[in-house]
Image (cartoon, grey):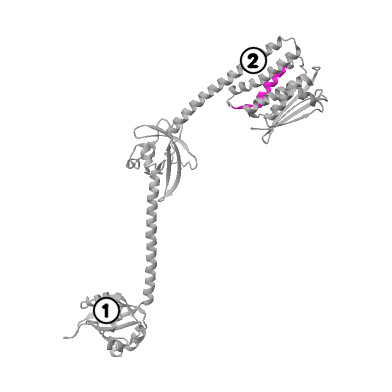
Amino acid sequence: MANIDLPSYSNFPFDTLFKESSTLFYCCLLDEYFPVTFISPNSQQILGYNSEDFINNDQLWLERIHPEDRGQVLTSYEGLSKGEKSLIDFRFKHREGHFVWLRDEVILQNGEKGRNNVIIGTSSEITKRKRAEIKLNSINSRLEEKVRERTQSLKIREKRFWKILQLSFDAIVEVNSAGKILDCNKRATDYFGYCREELTDMHVSKLGSTHKNKLHTNILSQFTATENEVREQFFQKKDGTIFPAEVNTKKYVAEGETRLITFIRDISDRKKKEKKLRQSLEEKKVLLIEVHHRVKNNLAIITGLLQLQADHSHNLKSKESLLEISTRIHAIALVHEKLYQADSYSQIRLDKYVNEIISGITKAFNKDATNINIKKDIAPISLNINQAIPCGLLLNELLTNCFKHAFPAKDKGRINIKILEVNNFVTIKISDNGKGLPQNFDNLKEKSLGFTIIDQIVNQLNGSLRIDSNNGSCFEIKFTLA
């Protein structure tokens, strides 16, 4: 093997290394002030002090270490054992007054006989890195503080929401896709009589009633979301009591699985009140039917008496007056008859009501006028009792006038009845092709009881009346539908 000539240590360019390196090399004695015995020339560049400054001032090295760091440096130096290394970061005051960060790595070497031990060390200038580290630590500290604050805020909110959940008027139950109850609030334990531990280990189907839900799907067992819809369902308590409830369910995803959140409200008290209310309404319904029935019967008796009196009267004028009064009372009686026969006790179908009024008047005044034709065009309008009776009387008066005055010879004729509703306005139009109104009609109507009644009824309905006498007579009444 050939011999290789290696450069001797005496030829190694230490001066160049010491001048160009960013790392200080130094030796100091393990003494009270740790006087420096050697320091590399680059100390001038890094610390602002040259080698002579340190050699001539035994306390310079220790004094320029930052007071806050000096204690740990001393502890590091004094704690060295032979062959043991120590690594420490500290601040050193530059000659210009600012501090630079140094990373010190030292080792203890025993001195020759009778001499102090020597500390051999290197110090790397890490000011930029340390500032970045301090800044990063500061950012981390702020982030950690924000995380702590956020965590504390979330804990407070969680406690607040949990309290709200427990104070909820509804039972709230969380169910997974397998039908197992995962959690519930206090109201759920109150409703069902189970403790929370029992409920959270139970399948939701055990809460449903076994015999009252035959017509209802068990919403919870079917894992069905009702969203904005509220359904009714029966549930069973631990003691076997069955109670009705409103149920609303919604789905959501938590911990990677779909869950069902269920809101249950006991409506037992409401159902009892509804039952009492239905009973009360049924009683009032029976009473109202009886009232209408009795009123109708009483009016029918009066009508019968008037007709009987008319049949026995030999005075034609008296007979007509009695018949007119009879038809008016009959028009009122029909309202009560229709009310107790109908499903609604406040609304009357005008088309059905008018047909019976026409039938009654025809029987009373059209016995000899078989050729008078009545044409009807009546919309299916519903009126309340406050408008139905005035309308009945109004139709009664107008039709009576047609039969009495439009066709004096009782010959062929036509009466048109048209009733319609447009934009909440009702129009009643009754016309005939008879002889028309007399020229002195304005004077006559002031003396006529029938036209006085018509005017009063139109005013009662807050309506308007238009009269036309071309080609017969035409009466048009308009009023607002209540």
Image height of 471 relative to 424, above or below: above
Q: Is residue 180 left or right of residue 463?
A: left
Q: Is residue 2 visible?
A: no
Residue ranking furthest to the left = 114
Disc 1 and disc 2: Cα gap in Å? 131 Å
Residue 140 in the image, given as x and y percentages of width and height = 38, 66
Image height of 432 relative to 153, above or below: above
Q: Earlier in the sequence, mark 1 or mark 2?
A: 1
Which corner quadrant of the image does residue 43 belong to?
Answer: bottom left
Q: Quadrant of the N terminus?
A: bottom left
Q: Of the residues shown, which amino acid type is indicated by label 1?
A: Val
Q: Quadrant of the C terminus?
A: top right
User: Which element type, helix, strand or loop, lies under badge 1?
Assistant: strand
Name the residue: 40% across, 33% down: 243
Viewer-proximal residue among 247 and 291:
291
Residue ranking furthest to the bottom = 11
**What residue did someone put label 1 on?**
106
Q: Nearer the viewer, mark 1 or mark 2?
A: 2
Crowd around label 1: few <14 · some 14–19 · many ≥20 (10 Å)? many
Residue 308 in the image, given as x and y percentages of width and height = 68, 11
